[in-house]
Image (spheres, rainbow, N blue to C red):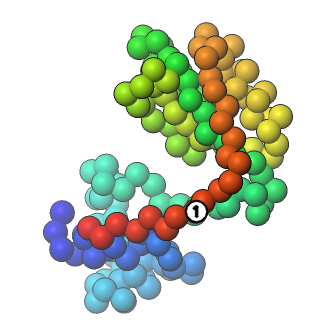
Amino acid sequence: MDDTDRAILNRIQSDFPIASRPYLIVAQELGLEEDEVIRRITQLKNDGIIRRIGANFVPGRLGFVSTLCAARVPKEKIPLFSETVNRYPGVTHNYRRDHEYNIWFTFIAESMERIESNLKEIASKTGVTEILNLPATKVYKLRAQFEV
């Protein structure tokens, strides 16, 4: 990763241009060609530096609810459990932690009833029954911008 990659990463982390050609806008701001920005972002994705490019929504403002879930998953079931959880469109994060509840994920849906139903399905499909549903009582949104 060179200084140009770092400049692109710093620019696209927040306030991504909402336009028909966002990479052209980024390129113009950084004194680059649009094709170069696209090529570099593609390479950063292929290298695992960029996980995804997408919008972050505030679920409550769109009429949705969200929750944090924690599961106690036996080591041998981690791949099955993680793959199963990741199939649900409302799952936005899914990660392993060094804790007795070792798999944590966030879930967004149109209702808490839908989330609870999905959690029951996940338990049924995986045999993992210890899944905590930890809905937020207050939401704090922090702007996470990291200088690269």
Q: How many marks?
A: 1
**Based on the displayed image, in which of its 4 quarters is residue 27 positioned?**
bottom left
Q: Nearer the viewer, residue 27 or 62?
A: 62
Q: Taking 46 as reference, is 83 left or right? A: right
Q: Nearer the viewer, residue 15 or 98?
A: 98
Q: Position of residue 89 (x, y in %)?
A: 65, 41
Q: Taking 77 as reference, is 139 left or right? A: right
Say if 44 sits above or below 82 in the image. below
Q: Is residue 89 visible?
A: no
- Give the residue number, with chain letter if any, for mark 1: 141
Q: Nearer the viewer, residue 20 or 88?
A: 88
Say if 91 sits above or below 38 in the image. above
Image point (30%, 54%), residue name: 49
Image point (42%, 25%), residue name: 99
Q: Disc 1 marks which amino acid?
A: Lys
Q: Residues within 10 Å of mark 1 (few under 14, many from 20)?
A: few
Q: Residue furthest left?
A: 2
Q: Residue furthest front?
A: 137
Secondary structure beneath label 1: loop
Q: Taking 60 as reference, is 84 left or right? A: left
Q: Position of residue 46 (x, y in %)?
A: 31, 51
Image point (30%, 58%), residue name: 44
Q: Position of residue 138 (x, y in %)?
A: 68, 54
Q: Position of residue 98 (x, y in %)?
A: 37, 27
Q: Is residue 26 visible?
A: yes
Say if 119 sits above or below 7 in the image. above
Image point (75%, 48%), residue name: 65
**Based on the displayed image, in which of its 4 quarters is residue 57 positioned?**
bottom right
**Quadrant in which the N terminus is drawn:** bottom left
**Quadrant in which the C terminus is drawn:** bottom left
